[in-house]
Amino acid sequence: MKIAVTYENGMVFPHFGHTAQFKLYEVENGQILRTQVVDTNGQGHGALAGLLAQLGVDTLICGGIGGGAQMALAQAGIKLYGGVSGTADEAVLALLHGNLGYDPNVHCDHHGQDHHCGEHSCGQDHQGCTGNGSCEH
């Protein structure tokens, strides 16, 4: 199993389409064998699903994510755990232990400068999106 986490400074980055890095975890028999941080090289949204597929990723943990990216991940056969916040390492360990808190209905839309998390419009950029319908600024 290869897990990718949207990543910034040890934390789950709050929006899939704007992540500059992924932290990759190679897992076997429930144990993390190795980790690696990879740059996205400015690729965004749909292109990121292709990048993850090329890297052999089968599972993604992220904060907010739009519908188009969700479809691209599904087409690539990558299982999505969205609406996650906190540290990347703790999120992966929680997934491996079967107790990761995530939102199966996560969805974020961007319209101009305003950012909408679920039904909540915070009027801020994507940095505060937790992916669970709230924004923290």
Image: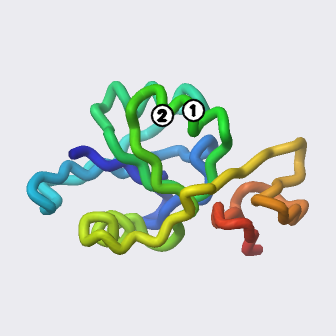
Does residue 64 appear to the left or right of 92 in the view shown?
Answer: right
Residue found 62% across the figure and 44% down from its top:
18
Say which amino acid is labelled 1: Met
Q: Disc 2 vs disc 1: Cβ atoms closer than 8 Å?
A: yes
| Image quadrant in which the N terminus is located | top left
Quadrant in which residue 134 is drawn: bottom right
Residue 17 screen position, x and y as percent: 62, 41
**Vertically, is 98 above or below 44?**
below
SS for dot 1: helix
Mark 2 to mark 1: distance in Å?
5 Å
Does residue 91 appear to the left or right of 47 in the view shown?
Answer: left
SS for dot 2: helix
**Vertically, is 34 above or below 58?**
below
Residue 75 screen position, x and y as percent: 47, 26
Give the label on residue 74, or none.
2
Pick the residue in front: 57 or 104: 104
Q: Which color scheme does this rendered protein use?
A: rainbow
> Would residue 12 be seen by someone viewing this image from the given angle?
yes
Give the label on residue 71, or none.
1
| Image quadrant in which the C terminus is located | bottom right
Q: Residues within 10 Å of mark 1 (few under 14, many from 20)?
A: some
Residue 68 screen position, x and y as percent: 65, 33
Residue 121 screen position, x and y as percent: 88, 62
